[in-house]
Amino acid sequence: MTHPTLLPGARALRPRALDLYSCSGGAGTGLARAGFEVDGCDLVDRPNYPFPYHRGDALAYLARLIDSREIRRYAFVHASPPCQDKCTLTVGTNRSQGWGAAHEDLVAPTRALLELTGLPYVIEQPNGRADIRKDLTLCGEMFGLGVIRHRNFELGGWSIEQPAHVPHRGRVRGYRHGRFYDGPYVAAYGNGGGKPTVAELQAAMGITWTDVREELTEAIPPAYTEWIGRAFLTSARLGVAA
């Protein structure tokens, strides 16, 4: 698999990225800051999404783009398939207690279609047992954020060196097993006791365009994909392939 080389010094249109399972646009905003034009796709209506987007099933939409060859508009694809099936909470406490509903794992079918595009791509998943290669792991402390929010990324058709993990400065603020702990990070999930306010979440994640808690708790901090997008564009300009 190859990706287009960007000639040094050449003036060109901004490359276009496809943001699948886009939610409120955390990943898309980071890619835009890195230098991409961004189009999103999400199954749910996302009026706060800051870029053009298609509302519908991401897999069906991607298949349609491939069949119609419209996928050629894009230089890069970012995908965040629903993670509930293999996330730490589902495979840990919830499953052991018989809580929660069944969830479909969309990682494998997403990867299969991404491979058919012939484009470089990223699949993002949280820590847990998602069946992806952990080619890259990023953490909020690497970017001076107010969340830990470890995220793993599988890189398809390109590669980048893993940056050094930065030691955490303390605990995530909130209750654990009935005891409250203070710390420099907020818990970007749920809305139970000790969870941050919406304003605190916005500041910690670096997200200002939505005040919907569910969107904030599901988002990727834009700093992550800005770093990834810049790394990809640098590798493309240098003609580096996986």
Image: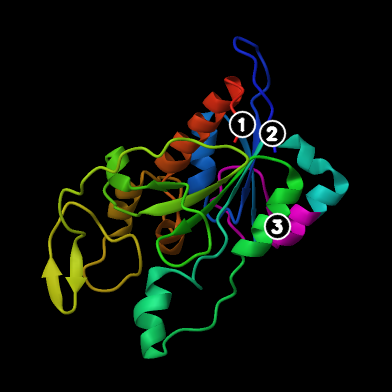
Residue 50: where, in percent of width, then height? 56, 44
Give me the residue at 40% from left, 48% from top: 137
Give me the residue at 60% from left, 12% from top: 8
Residue 70: where, in percent of width, then height? 81, 42
Residue underneath mark 3: 112
Query: Who comes first in sequence, dot 2 or dot 3?
Result: 2
Q: Which disc is residue 62 wearing?
A: none
- What segment is highlighted magenta in the picture? 45-63
Residue in front for this viewpoint, 128 or 173: 128
Above or below — where is 97 with respect to 165?
below
Image-quadrant location for residue 5: top right
Q: Which disc is residue 2 wearing?
A: 2
Give amino acid for label 3.
Ala
* Magenta-drawn stretch contains 49: yes
Q: CA distance from mark 2 to mark 1?
A: 6 Å
Let me know if residue 56 appears in the view: no
Q: Which disc is residue 241 wearing?
A: 1
